[in-house]
Image: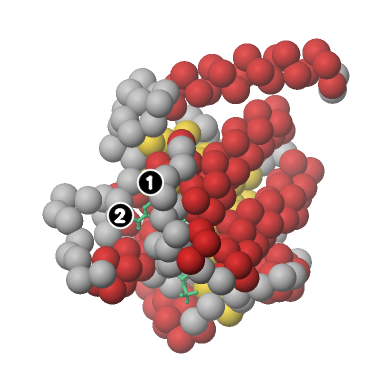
Amino acid sequence: VQFIDKYGPWAVISGASEGVGRAFARQLAERGLNLVLIARREGPLRELADGLTAEFGVECAAASVDLEAPGSSERVAEAVGARDVGLYVSNAGADPHGSRFLDLDLEKWQGLVNRNVTNLMRCCHKFGTAMRTRGRGGIILIGSGACYGGAGHLAVYAGSKAFSLNFAEGLWSELRPHGVDVLYMALNMTDTPELRRLLGSRGQLVPEGIAQPEDVAAQALGSLGAVHLVNWGAADEEPGFAPTSASSRRLRTLAIDAASSKVFGD
Ligand SMILES: NC(=O)c1ccc[n+]([C@@H]2O[C@H](COP(=O)([O-])OP(=O)(O)OC[C@H]3O[C@@H](n4cnc5c(N)ncnc54)[C@H](OP(=O)(O)O)[C@@H]3O)[C@@H](O)[C@H]2O)c1
């Protein structure tokens, strides 16, 4: 089966205007998918959309939505309209603050939770429902190695990424029988404009040899449907920066799934 037959005709990408999201947009356009591109800044989105249409002949819609705002999932739904979405890529999700929990205004943290937890969950419900009905589709959640444990300056961020990892594993387990593939991609440092801005604001340079957005997107698209979790830089059997390997988490998810199915039935 061709990628577009399984995951087309439309893909929705959050955080599409730069970095990893932009790399997804280009690689999906190359595969012939039409795109709904979401971010706050409309200018870079429009430019990307027009460029991809000119180069690959795909349709591209650009929607300026602040995913931190309450009700953002409804704005996403409005932007998508009646389009037939076969792939949802949730990419926007970095922590621009790098602050201790109590040293930042609570509403800033609430915005991060709105974007990384609430909006993500609601969009997965919307797109997942249509995919399950259709019996095909894919959901890619871009996460972080921070999903495996907390640390100072990362309390809310790591908590939100732990949510998305566990949420993804549950979705993977539930949607597998319906032909819908779910992938969690736990990134290590990746050379995005956002990382450069964050490090630059602290007078630091981007370290050499870190992941490139194009490689991250290519690995995610190549892994969708084959595995449920990729730890960037680590093979399926290696823990890497995580306490357990991707494959041992998969076995754990399946074992708990078998036990919970006995309790909850189908
Ligand atoms: N870069 C790394 O080293 C690294 C490491 C581990 C994990 N990750 C993960 O990789 C993903 C991408 O990270 P990133 O470094 O590229 O930074 P990011 O801020 O998550 O992503 C940048 C993209 O998201 C959009 N965006 C950010 N906030 C938004 C909001 N409130 N509403 C709508 N769009 C928003 C940005 O466009 P606008 O500014 O126009 O809205 C831009 O297109 C994130 O999930 C992050 O947690 C990154």
Q: Secondary structure at mark 1?
A: strand
Callout 1 amino acid: Leu
Please report the residue visible at 56 percent of the width from the left and 18 percent of the height from the top. 252
Quadrant location of ligand 1? bottom left
> Where residue 207 appears, x then y in whole percent?
17, 56
Residue furthest to the left: 208
Q: Quadrant of the C terminus?
A: top right
Please report the residue visible at 27 percent of the width from the left and 66 percent of the height from the top. 199
Q: Secondary structure at mark 2?
A: loop
Marks 1 and 2 in Cβ contact (< 8 Å): yes
Would you call the spot at circle 2 few (<14 residues within 10 Å), some (14-19), or many (20 or more)?
A: many
Q: Nearer the viewer, residue 245 or 47?
A: 245
Measure the C-alpha gap from mark 1 to mark 2: 7 Å
Whether 192 is drawn above or below 45: the answer is above
Q: Is residue 111 visible in the rendered structure shown here?
A: no
> Where residue 104 appears, x then y in whole percent?
51, 68
Q: Is mark 2 within 8 Å of ligand 1?
A: yes
Q: Quadrant of residue 89?
A: bottom right
Please report the residue visible at 40 percent of the width from the left and 42 percent of the height from the top. 145
Task: Answer left or right for 215 relative to 230.
Answer: left
Would you call the spot at circle 1 few (<14 residues within 10 Å), some (14-19), or many (20 or more)?
A: some
Circle on res. 190: 2
Q: Is mark 1 within 8 Å of ligand 1?
A: yes
Callout 2 amino acid: Thr
Task: Answer left or right for 89 relative to 85.
Answer: left
Q: Nearer the viewer, residue 196 or 218?
A: 196
Q: Which residue is mark 1?
A: 187
> Where residue 92 appears, x then y in whole percent?
50, 62
Residue furthest to the bottom: 43
